[in-house]
Amino acid sequence: MRTPSRDTSGRRIGSTGKTGRVLLSGVLAICLAGSMAVQPIQADAAKPKPPVIPSKAAVERAKQAAASKAGQVAVIEQQLAAANTRLEQLGIQSGIADEAYNGALYKLQQAKAEAADAAARAAKAQQTLTTQRQQIGRYAAASYQGGGELARVAPLLTSDGPQELLDSAGTAHTVSTAMQASYLRFTATQVVTNLFKVQAEQALAKVKKATDEAAKAKKAAEDAEAAQAAAVTAMDVLRTKSIAQLAVLQNTSIKVAAQRQRGLEELARQRAAALAARKAAELARRIAAREAAEKAREKAEQAREKAEQAREEKEAREQAKKNHGKKPPKHHKPDKPRRDDDNDNGGGSSGRGAGSAIDFALSQLGDMYLWGGTGPSRWDCSGLMMGAWKRAGVQLPHYSVAQYEAIRHINEDDLRPGDLIFWAVNPNDPGTIHHVAMYLGNGRMIHAPRTGKPVQIDSVYYWVPPNFFGRP
């Protein structure tokens, strides 16, 4: 291989360097041109994207969706409110059924007592009838032993003759008269006995009817209790499901939705309680006004009596002066008439008795309701009132209707602590009473409300207004 000479190599190298400089200059020119071309593209990329502007139709659809969700929320809240109302109605129906069962038992006990009395009367009449039948038999035997017509003629053949015949005739007449009277008594007794037997049979039929009615009332009460229990379960399911739906529709958590629902229910309860409190305060005001008026009348009466006494004393002194110091004879002053309220033993409860009843009822606070319950730790409404007044020495039946019938009836404005308050289906018919409570004063009462709730203190108007009032 041939190696180039130094000169030749140098020339080539020099030539190459020139060419490289030319190439470098071209590359730089291209790069500058490229850089100048890139800058406008980067500036365009930094500009903000134009906003997405929804169409009017899209806005309208969004509004409709929001309105739809709001409507669904309102429907769910209405369902929950309706379920709460239904639960309260079932509680009322359950209480009515419970008291109807108590009433059926009460009537059954009365029917059994009447049947026992009728059976005793019939048995006694039958015994009397048997005794009288035996007595008639003895009279008949005595008459037969007299010997008939031949025996009556035989004395004529004896030495005593007619006198003995007259004596035997008198005896026969006496036996015949007694026998006839006994027969009349027997006939009358037989009629009475048959009547008593009929009454006993009717009483037994009444017992059977009362037993059937008690069984039906028990079944109705059990059905009402079951319906209420099922409603409570359904209410819990509906509440959970509805709250979950509310959470989705309102885009909130289940916890917040549940809190909202509880808040709505609590707000409704507070409003109802405030209304009940206003009514209770008005009742307390009316009672206080009546008591104040009575005290004012008593004070005026006392002042009048003092004035009358002063006048009489003045007249007595003037009369004594006229009689030269001799005192006039005293006139008997008539007794002051007493109101019913002055005599607690005459148809009204004494303060001490009412206090004992109230203390007993308050000691049962928190005990759960049980239909037919009479203690010691479970009660229904009439059972609690019966137990409370029993502690005060007053016997009441275990039936709210019979309790009202057994006590003195009063007006609402005459209520005192310890008095009983009644609710009826028909406000004009005490025979439809189905709930009873005890008045505590200041518009408050204590009672056993219904299944699922304990003995508690409420406003007299926490529910519907009461209808009847009484004092043991």
Image (tube, rainbow, N blue to C red):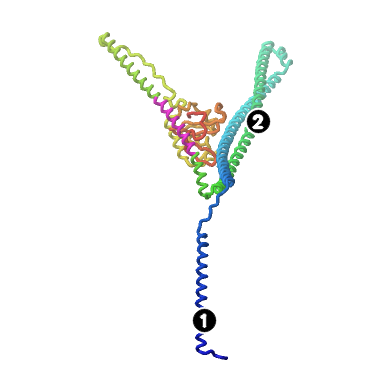
Q: Is residue 246 left or right of residue 140?
A: left
Depth check: give the residue in front, 318 or 161. Answer: 318
Q: Which residue is mark 2?
A: 205
The residue tagged with tag 1: helix, strand or loop? helix
Calculate the distance from the C-alpha at mark 1 to the C-alpha at mark 2. Answer: 142 Å
Q: Residue at x 52, y 73 (%)?
A: 26
The residue tagged with tag 2: helix, strand or loop? helix
The image shows residue 21, relative to residue 387, as above or below, that is below
Q: Which residues are magenta?
A: 269-292
Residue 281 is inside the magenta segment: yes
Depth check: give the residue in front, 206 or 386. Answer: 386
The spot of residue 450 in percent (x, y) is: 54, 38
Q: Which residue is mark 1?
A: 16
Q: Is residue 203 visible?
A: yes
The spot of residue 125 in percent (x, y) is: 63, 25
Q: Is residue 232 visible?
A: no
Q: Residue at x 69, y 11 (%)?
A: 161
